[in-house]
Each structure stands twice: as C-alpha cells, then as structure tokens.
Image (cartoon, rainbow, N blue to C red):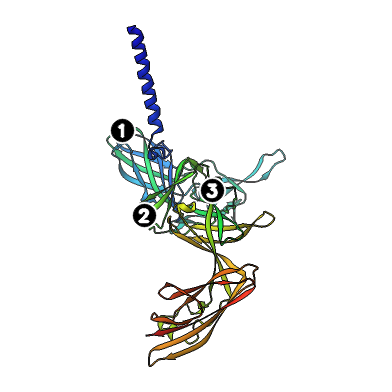
Amino acid sequence: MKKLLGLLLGVTVLALLLIFRLTACHAAPAAAQEKETFADDNSTALTIYNQNFFVAREHVPLDLQPGVNQAEYAGIAAHLEPDSVILRDPNGRALQILEQNYRNDPVSPEMLLSFYEGKTIDFVVGRNADGSDVKIKGKVIRSGYASPNYIQGFPQPVSTQPIVEVDGVLRFGLPGEPVFPALSADSILKPTLSWLLRTDTPGKFNAEISYVSGGMNWQSDYNVVVQDQAGSKTDLLDMIGWITMRNFSGKTFEDAKIKLMAGDVSKIQEPTLAGRAYAATQMVEVDVGAAPVVREKSFDEFHLYTLQRPTTLRDAETKQVEFVRATGIHAQRLFIYDGADTAQYGYYNPEQIRQDVNYGTASNPKVWVMEEFKNAEANHLGIPLPKGKLRFYRRDTDGHLEFVGENVIDHTPKDETIRVFTGNAFDVTGERKRISYHVDSNQRWMDESFEIRLRNHKKDAVEVRAVEHLYRWTNWKLSEQSADSRKTDAQTIEFPVTIAPDGELVITYTVHYSW
C-alpha cells in the first residue's frame, strides 16, 4: 500500500510540474515573444539609413601571439569610411591598434601592367589552327595606369595610353592581350583592411569590426488601391507598403541581420552613387492575417524597422520586402481650388506684395484632386510610416486596375493625417478674377474683392474647397462674403462649397487690409 501511495504521489507531482511548465510557456509575456529572432552573435548585421550609407558589423577570425601581430580583413565594402572603423574583442580582450591601413585598389589589367613597366612580357595576338595562342613579346615602356583620384571619398579612375615596344618599334596601345607571369606580392584582389595589433592576451577569437560605408540605401513605396463606394463621400483604400533596399557597396553580405533606420539623421553626406536599379511595382491581394516580415520600434528620435529573418544582400542587387498591409482604410477625396497664380513672384518680399497692384490677379484654372486619410489604428493603420512614394490605383468597370496618380509623403508618425495630391480634376474647373481694388496709402488701408467661379461637368455633385490666401498684409478682415468661410491659418481661408451636377457656383468676397 505504501509503495502504491508513493507511486501515485510521484505521478501527481510530475503531472503538476508538467502543467506548470505548459502554463508558463503559454503565459510568456508579449515582450519575450517579440524578441528579435536573430540569436547568432557572430552573424553579420547591417543598419541601413535612407541617406545612402549604412553601418556594418562583421566578425574577423584572429589568432594573436603575445606582442605585435599583423592581421588583415579582405573583402571590406568598397566605399568604407576608414576613420569610422572600430575593431574590438566582444569578450573584452585588450587590443591596441598600432596601425591601420585601408587599400581599395584591387588588381586590374592596367595595374598589373604598371608592375611590369620596363620589363618584357608576352601578348596574345591570335590563335593557331590547333587552338594554341599566337604570342609576341613586347616591352612595357608605359603602362598608362595611374592611382585613382578620390573625389569626396569615391575613386575616379585615371589612365593614359600605354606604350609598348615591339621589335624595336614603339606602339601606342597594347599589341594584344597581355599575359602576366604572376601576381605581384603587393597585389590585392578585394578592398582590404590591415592592422598592426598589440595584445598581452594571445589566442584565437572572433573580433568584431564595425564601420560606416556609403553605397547602400533603402526607400519605402506604397501601392494603394482605391475602392469606389457608390453614394458615399468617402473612399476605401487597400494599402501595401514595400521596403526596397539597394546595395552598391561593392560587397555581398551573406545571411545578414538587417535593420532600417527611418528619420533625418545628421550625416555629412557623400554624393549619391550613379545607377539606381528599377524596382517593378507589385500588386497583391491583401491578407491581413499574415505575420509581418518587418517589425517597427522607436529608437532615440528615429524609428527602426527590423527584418524578422536573416537575408542575403548581394552587391548590385535590389531587394524588396513587404512591411505594411492594411485594408478598409477610410479616406476622403478632396477637390481643392487654389486660384491665385503667384509662381512668378516667388522672390517678392511682403512690402512688394502689398504694393504691387497686379500681384495675385493671374488665375489658375486647375482644381487639385487629393486623398486624405488618418494614420490611426482605428483606421486600420497606426504605425509610423517612413517617407516614400504613394501610387494610387483605381479599378475600372472591366475589373482592371488603372494608375490614377502618385506623390510622396514625408516621415509620418501614427495618428497624423496624410493628404496626398494625386492630379488635377478633368471635369471640375475654376476661374478667379479681381472685381474691385481700392487703396488709400495716406490712411493706410486697402480693399480688394474677388469673384471665384467653380464649374462641375460631372453627373454627380462635388464638394470643393476654394482656398484664398490673404497675402497683402497680416492685418485683415472679411467685410463681405457670399459663402461661409473658415480660417485655416493666419493668412489663409477656405470656402467649402457643393457644386450641383453640370452646375456652376460663384463665390465673392471683399477683404479689408490695414497697416
């Protein structure tokens, strides 16, 4: 009986322990579940900024002896900023860097030719019937190679025409393809960092190297499908956001942990690299149940977007990953008429604006079309959106998506409103003209009246906001107005009006200035 009770007690305790363990697993806090999936500290890590530079963290295997050691790392990024390099032992081993050298002159035919100046080498000038090479000998008088000039950190190749002596005759240019006996001992095949290191703690370990380099960029792009809602004043939007990474660093990064920094980081910028690969627009159906492949978090005064799995970013490659998808975003299509054409007066100061009788009398006939929506969780968004291009599509009656406009947004925090210009209306037009003007310079006042005509050639009524800039002076008041207006800032008002189908609406107002 005692043995039976002991056995039952042991089974009960084991069961309780198992239940406790399962409960603890299911009750793990969300923060623990959201830990980054990368656990290998020896893996390559990249933080890419959308200002054409990045920070890399890699590991260099070292085997050091007591005292001074020579070490090198071949295959560094081609646009490295040498003074940004940090070499350290993650485990705290003391390393004294006595000297650091960076070489970015990988071997090339022109460079090899310079190593053989004054020497005779073979040149292939053709092939025999049996496939063997036909060679002649030539003495390299001048290779034509010169060290590249560096303009703001980027190598600019420099060369002159080579001179080769063949059979006692000088030739400008190569007589054939040069055949080099061997690589020079001073040749490198990839950009290379080398060090003289001193340590009192010998042994093998993986040193961590971090550096800043140009030649890598990222941007966000948003594809937005507008769904028409019959009889509704609002649109429904489906949005897919893509992150596009471009690597022109001269190096491939295998299985890298990648973070993307969004924000305006202060950085003395190098000129942008030539050549930007084209990334094709991709349209897919929205699946709100899919797990995100990019996770966002705040960092300092910026935002970090972390790819949730390692990826390989090859040199000269453009890679895209999806980072946001949302459906059912409520938006409002706005028609904005800003009728004063003042572009030609961009250099005017406030006094000139007040004194020029003709300022603001030219009319702009275009009515802008804009989409406005709130980046809020209640509106199926609510995440910080990095700056990028929004492309709008609308489905035609045959079911096909048609492109209807695009524009860019700046970095947009959550709970902010986004208003994007998508084009000019075709069937809604405007006309603006001044109908009276009175000024009394002695009494320091001015009265100015305008007439705004808005025409709607659609079969449905449209709401238009007629925007007026009271630009003559900061002291003003409306003495007359034919429609209600609202003040949007210190010198701007707008008239929200509804225009009937195939109709016209006239707005008049008079503004009184004093100074």
Q: Residues within 10 Å of mark 2 (few under 14, many from 20)?
A: few
Q: Residue at x 34, y 7 (%)?
A: 3
Q: Which kind of residue does numbered mark 3 sit on? A: Gln
**Which residue is identified by label 2?**
301
Q: Residues within 10 Å of mark 3 (few under 14, many from 20)?
A: some
Q: Earlier in the sequence, mark 1 or mark 2?
A: 1
Figure quadrant of the C terminus: bottom left
Q: Which mark is residue 202?
A: 1
**Which residue is identified by label 3?**
320
Q: Which kind of residue does numbered mark 1 sit on? A: Pro
Q: Earlier in the sequence, mark 2 or mark 3?
A: 2
Q: Which mark is residue 511?
A: none
Circle nearer the viewer, 3 or 1: 3
Q: CA distance from mark 2 to mark 3?
A: 25 Å
Q: Secondary structure at mark 3?
A: strand
Q: Position of residue 223 (x, y in %)?
A: 56, 54
- Tell me if residue 80 can be seen: no
Camera-side residue of 181 and 200: 200
Dots 3, 1 in contact, CB < 8 A? no
